[in-house]
Amino acid sequence: MTSAVPRLVVAAPSSGSGKTTVATGLMAALAGRGLAVSPHKVGPDYIDPGYHALATGRVGRNLDAYLCGPELVGPLFLHGARGCDIAVVEGVMGLYDGAAGEGELASTAQVAKLLRAPVVLVVDASSQSRSVAALVHGFVSWDPEVRVGGVILNKVGSDRHEALLREALDSAGVPVLGVLRRVPRVETPSRHLGLVPVAERGAQAVEAVAAMAAQVSDGCDLEALVGLARSAGALECAAWDAGEVLRCSPPGATASGPPLSAPDGPRPRTPDGLGPRVAVAGGAAFTFSYAEHAELLAAAGAEVVVFDPLRDEELPEGTAGLVVGGGFPEVYASELSANEPLRKAVAELALGGAPVAAECAGLLYLCRELDGLPMCGVLDASARMSERLTLGYRDAVAVTDSSLAVAGTRMRGHEFHRTVVEPGAGVAPAWGMRAPERRVEGFVERGVHASYLHTHWASEPGVARRFVERCRTS
C-alpha cells in the first residue's frame, strides 16, 4: 500500500532548543486553520504527547524504533494519521541522538528517514550569529539521507540579531521558515521528570498551548511549512491495525509461548454481556500510557474502562483485570494513600488472583508504602523518592510466566524514574535485563506483573491477548 500523508519532522541540534514549543505551536496553529493534524513524538516520552493532544484534539502517539522496531514506525504512523490532512512529528534530543551504543537506532534522524519526511531544524540562536550557518551546515551535511528542508530560529533577541542570522543562513543556502523571539509566557513548568503533564495543569495548559500557537503563527511561514510537508515521499506500507495484528499472532500467547487453557464451563462475562472488563488507571497521577495498549486490549475482546485512583473509591463494577501504567504517584502520594477504599479494592482484586499489569508508577502504587505513606500493599516492598535518575532503554527477557508473557519472551523497554523500590525484585522476578546491565527486576505474584519497565505492546501484541484471556479465566 502506498500513502502520501503530508508530514514533517520538527528536530533540533540538542535538547532545550525549543522543539516542543515549535511542534506543539505548529500543531495548534494548523488545527486552528481547520486542518486535521496528526500529532506524533519520537521516542518513549509520555508527557509531550499530552500537549500534542491538547493542540490537535487527537491522541498523541509515539514513534519509537527501539521499543517497536524500525519496521513498525511507518505502520504506526499511518495508524495515527488515518483521516488527517497533515502530520507533525516532534523529535527527541538532538537530531542524530539515539539509543546509547546503537548508532542511529531510535534517533529522530532514523525516524525521519523511515517516514521519508522532511526535517525542520529548530535552532536556539540566543548566543550566536554567523556561527549559526556552520552549525546548520553540519546538521544538513552529516547524513545525506536526512533532508533538512529549513530552519526555525528560536530565542532571537532583536531585529538586528535576526538580520545577522538570516544573512548567515542565506549564504549557507538553507531557508529560514520562522523566527521566534523570547516569550517567557509560552514556557511550560518542569520538575524531576520533565514537563508537568497537561492533566495536572488544566486551564494553564490550554493557555500555554494557545500562546505557542500564536507565537508560531506570528513568527513562522505556515504556507511554506505546509508545502514542505507535502513534499514528503510516499510510504509503501499498510497502517497498523490492532485487530489485524492480533489475528496474525498465536491465540492466547506471546510469539514465544503456548496458548492459555480455558477452564470448563462458560467464561465469565461483565454484567452488560461484553467481554471481560479491564480497568485502566487514569487521572492526574497516572498519565503515562500508549494509546495502542488500550486498542489492543479492546481488539482482544476486553471492555476497557478508565478510572481515577485520586477520585474513585471503587473499581469499575465487574472489573476482571487491572492495568496501572506510569505517572507521578510520588506527587500525589498523600491523596492516593487517603483513598483507602480504593486501595483495599485493588488489594482484594490482586490478592484474589485477577490479572494486574503495573508499570513504574503502577509498581509504586502496589507497594506496601511510598515515602512512608500506605499504598495498596499488594507487594511486600517499600518505595521512596531518590536523588538518582534512572533513565534509558533496556533489552529484557521475561523470567517468570505471568499474566502478560511466558518466560523467555523478549521485549525492549524503557526506564524513567527517580524512585527506588526495596527489594527491587520478588522471589519470582518479572524481567531479566540483558542490556545495558544484567540484573533481574520486578515482581510476578499470583496474577500480578509489576515492574519499572515501560514496554510498548505493539512490539509484542500477544501480551494483550494473553492478559485478556487471563481476565476471562481467572
Image: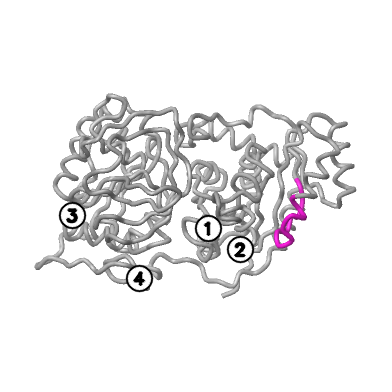
The boundaries of the magenta stretch are 139-151
Q: Amino acid at mark 4?
A: Ser
The quarter of the picture where residue 331 lies is: top left
Q: Which residue is mark 3?
A: 271
The quarter of the picture where residue 326 lies is: top left
Q: Which residue is mark 4?
A: 249
Q: Position of residue 87 (x, y in %)?
A: 61, 56
Q: Amino acid at mark 2?
A: Leu
Residue lying at the far front in this picture: please name it. Answer: 438
Is residue 141 part of the magenta span, yes or no? Answer: yes
Mark count: 4
Q: What residue is drawn where x is 31% and y is 42%?
A: 307
Q: Tell me if 125 is positioned left or right of 236 in this view.
A: right
Question: Which of the two marks, 3 or 4, is nearer to us in this view?
Answer: 4
Tag 1: Cα neighbours inside 10 Å, few (<14), some, or many (≥20)?
many
Q: Secondary structure at mark 1?
A: loop
Q: Nearer the viewer, residue 52 or 453?
A: 453
Q: Secondary structure at mark 2?
A: helix
User: Distance from label 1 to label 3 (Cα)?
Assistant: 40 Å
Q: Position of residue 474 (x, y in %)?
A: 16, 56
Q: Amino acid at mark 3?
A: Pro
Q: What residue is drawn where x is 65% and y is 64%?
A: 116
Tag 2: Cα neighbours inside 10 Å, few (<14), some, or many (≥20)?
some
Q: Position of residue 29 (x, y in %)?
A: 66, 45
Question: Which of the two marks, 1 or 3, is nearer to us in this view?
Answer: 1
Q: What residue is drawn where x is 21% and y is 36%?
A: 380
Q: Which residue is mark 1?
A: 65
Q: Which residue is mark 2?
A: 114
Evaluate whether residue 151 shows in this view. yes
Q: What residue is drawn where x is 37% and y is 30%?
A: 330
Tag 4: Cα neighbours inside 10 Å, few (<14), some, or many (≥20)?
some
Counting residues from the N terminus, which is met first, the one under dot 1 or under dot 3? 1
